[in-house]
Image (cartoon, coloured by chain):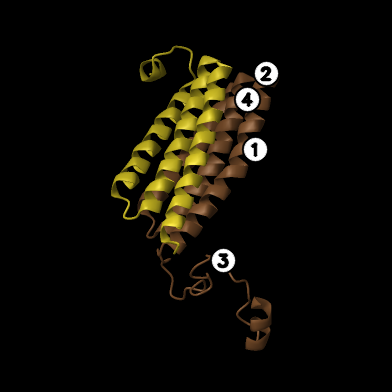
Chain colours: A yellow, B brown
Amino acid sequence: MSERLIGFSGVSPLIALSMLLLTVGLVLALVRVVRGPTIPDRVIALDFMASLVVGLLLLLGATLELLSIVDIAIVLALIAFLSTVAFASLIERRTREP
Amino acid sequence: MTVLAGLLALIGALLMVIAGIGLLRMPDFYTRMQAAAKAGTLGILLIVAATGLLLGNLSALLHALLVSLFFLLTTPLAAHLLGRAAYLSGIRPLVHEDDLAGQYHQKTHELRSVPHSAPPDRAEALLE
């Protein structure tokens, strides 16, 4: 079952199920990104999607026993935080009178 | 140990899915934001703990500690900044009485921190 899910034998079925659930969360957040009535809605949904991908990367690193994937997850989290802060300051600056 | 880590990862993933459902179903922006920020943070922390337990060596545990500290620091910060920007750009929360109305300066976006109960002359003195 889990071998067919992510194509790697020896993975615990609980981890495979967790990765499946994280993918479901990714789809839910994507619906909010598409539908979101305002820009901050879309930004917070994108931030949440980034943390879901970080979770997926961490579980992948734990499954493949590769610590470098955890480093990739750290960098992705950093980029997501910086982009969210940049979007927030953009939204706020757009409303401020010069 | 593997089963414990798997259970931690499963609980974390369930929390992330609950946060996603909240992001989809909550009525206004601020409730959506707190769903994604709080439940999402706890979920990712549990997944990080599961990763540290699964890899098991000292380097992986230090990485897990680093990632969890990073998320604990950054997620509330990003949510706060975004909520403030959203309020200043005119999105109103879905409440009967907006206590923040008129508390932000129009031009400088400074928040005046005078309690409502303060008498008017005292409020003026605090604002100077």
Quarter of the image for the N terminus of chain B: give it: top right
Question: In the image, what residue occupies the spot 60% across and 80% down?
Answer: B116
The three-letter code of the residue at mark 4 reads: Leu
Instruction: Work out which residue is located at the far front of the displayed protein and give it.
Output: A98
The mark that comes first in sequence, 1 or 3, is: 1
The mark that comes first in sequence, 3 or 4, is: 4
Residue on which the image places disc 4: B53
Is residue B1 visible in the rendered structure shown here? no
Mark 1 lies on a secondary structure that is helix
Residue on which the image places disc 2: B57
What is the C-alpha distance between the residues marked 3 and 4?
45 Å
Q: Is B14 located above or below residue B94 in the figure?
A: above
Asked whether the residues under the numbered discs 2 and 1 touch, taking CB atoms below 8 Å apart as contact, a structural biologist would say: no
Residue on which the image places disc 3: B110
What is the C-alpha distance between the residues marked 2 and 1?
19 Å
What is the C-alpha distance between the residues marked 2 and 4?
8 Å
Mark 3 lies on a secondary structure that is loop
Return the mark for residue A79.
none
Label 2 CA crowd tier, 10 Å (few <14, some 14–19, many 20+): few
Is residue B69 visible in the rendered structure shown here? yes
Quarter of the image for the C terminus of chain B: give it: bottom right
Q: Mark 2 lies on which chain?
A: B
Question: In the image, what residue occupies the spot 41% across and 67% down?
Answer: B94
Between residues A38 and B105, which one lies in front from this camera angle? B105
